[in-house]
Every structure is written in structure tokens, then in C-alpha cells.
Image (tube, helix red, strand yellow):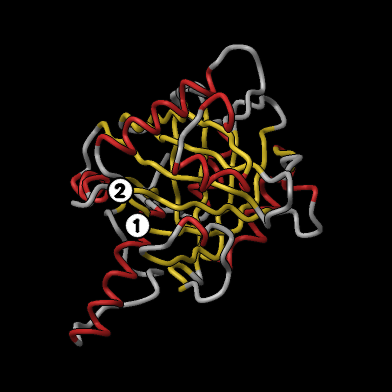
Amino acid sequence: MDGGRVEYKYLVPNSLLDRIRDDMRPYTDLDEFAGKGSTNEYTVRSVYYDTPWFDCYEEKLSGLYERKKFRIRGYDHPVESSLVFLEIKHKHGDAIEKSRAPILNRNLKDFLAAPDLDTYVVSRNKTGLEKRYAHQFLYHYHRYGLRPVALVVYDREAYFGKFGSSVRLTFDKNLRGAIMPSIDMLYEDEGLEYVMRNSSTLEVKFFRRSLPAWIVSIIKRYELPRMSLSKYAMTVELLRGMTRSAHHRVHFTAPLDTQWVGAPISRSA
């Protein structure tokens, strides 16, 4: 895994983004990956897997202290050398850990049909961790009958703290998605429904149990509510509701800029 980190999420109206960026500028550097494009952001694409009983979704709604999410993640738009990642996100309260196994996107369907770790898993070092993580993903994939439930797409603007790279901040914008996708839809842009259009999620990841003072100051200045903003759960909640409304005329409010999966945790850090 990539090590235990603490993750806090805050709801940010898009009208405040420029002001918060200005306040952050003395303390942050743009993530090198985000800086490669002209817009200083990149697109994150994930197909989330769940059991036939939506156990991961239900565990999130129940607020279980320990839970897992399973997803296949890619970035931007596909090219011949594009990697995708088999990921398990482990959550222990506010602490998170991720295991990731890279595979060439062009080999993904073949791998899922006949999972040969030696042939398909891309090893970046000699530790064998990538194959172990792929094996863990496959264990859950087959043991629990995981299936693709939601495609979640958003645009990420990412920063590192200047005075310690252990602090990472991201604005996740234009959250959109689809439910019951096929794995072929990972890079799909057409037909996605907006889940959050007028607000973004500020995610703060850090290794210490206290936030730097400058982050606390910004959070308090703009009264940013800390919330349990699961992109997967919000996408499922919205799009399942829209499906119910379309088929059974059940009312559902959308997009989720004022309706949340989870209540505010705190208005302070």
C-alpha cells in the first residue's frame, strides 16, 4: 500500500474557487502531473465495482469505521501506452490506504477474462508488490462476485504543500457519471450525468493528525463544511434515483449540490 494517510473532504461552492486558490498560492505548488496540461488539471476516471447486494455502497451509508472500495482507474484520454490501475481503497475512520496494480489499458479485458499476473501486470520495481495487489483485487473480484456499478468522472486540480510534500490538496470538479457501465466505458464522455455542477470537493490528505495552520485558516475564513463526500455513493444515489423517477415517477432532487450522502462532520478542521 502507499502508506496510511488522513483524508478530510470539504464542500466548496465554485464561486469561491478563485479566492481560495489565491489564498493557497503562497503555501502550495501545482502538482507536476496537473501542470502538464494547459488547464492545470487532469481528468480522473473510475469504474467502481460492488457486490450484487451493493455491500460497499451500503457500508458507506452505514458509516462503518472500516470499509473497502474496489475500482479500476484511468486518467485523461487513452493512448497506446495508457495504464489503468486495479485499486482497493481501504478506509479506517479518517485514515486511508490504497493498493494499486498497473495494467496497460489495451490489455485490461484480456486480463479480466484470463488473469495472468506475469503477462499483464506492469512491474515498476522488483518488490513484487504490484502482482500482490493485483492478486488481492482478483481475490475480492471472484470471491464476492464484484461487478461494475458506477462510472465516476471528474476533473482534478492538485497541489502539494511547499513546506512539506506530505500535504496534498485537490479540487475535484464537474463530478459526473453513469451507473451499470461496462469496462469499455472507462474513457467514455458522452451521456454522462452531472452529479455536482455548482460545487467542488476540496480533499486534503496529510500524514499528521493536525492540519497546517494556513489550511485551518482558509477553512475557517470561508466556513467550508467538512463532509462525507463519497463520489461513488453520491453518483449511485443520484443516478439510481433518476432511474426510479424515470420508470416509476418517484421524485428525486438533482444534481446533488444541496443534497448529500452524509451529514456535515464539522465546520472546523
Q: Quadrant of the C terminus?
A: top left
Q: Is residue 179 above or below residue 58?
A: below
Residue 31 on image: x %, y %: 72, 40
Residue sitting at 50 percent across and 39 percent down? 111
Residue 57 on image: x %, y %: 26, 50
What secondary structure is found at the residue carrying circle 2?
strand
Q: Residues within 10 Å of mark 1 (few under 14, many from 20)?
A: many
Residue sitting at 51 percent across and 23 percent down? 131
The span from disc 2 to disc 1 (Cα, nearest Å) is 6 Å
Residue sitting at 28 percent across and 69 percent down? 240
Q: Give the numbered dot on residue 233.
A: none
Q: Residues within 10 Å of mark 2 (few under 14, many from 20)?
A: many
Q: Is residue 249 above or below residue 70?
A: below
Q: Give the numbered dot on residue 149.
A: 1
Q: Is residue 264 above or below residue 130?
A: below
Closer to the camera in the image, 130 or 228: 130
What secondary structure is found at the residue carrying circle 1?
strand
Q: Is residue 253 above or below residue 157?
A: below
Drawn side of residue 58 relative to residue 173, left or right: left
For the residues bearing labels 2 and 1, Cβ distance under 8 angstroms:
yes
Identity, as a three-letter code, of the amino acid under mark 2: Asp
Drawn side of residue 5 relative to residue 158, left or right: left
Identity, as a three-letter code, of the amino acid under mark 1: Val
The residue that disc 2 covers is 50
Closer to the camera in the image, 178 or 15: 178
Drawn side of residue 248 relative to residue 98, left or right: left
Residue 36 on image: x %, y %: 80, 48
**Mark 2 vs mark 1: which is more N-terminal?**
2
Q: Residue furthest bottom?
A: 249
Residue 152 on image: x %, y %: 47, 58
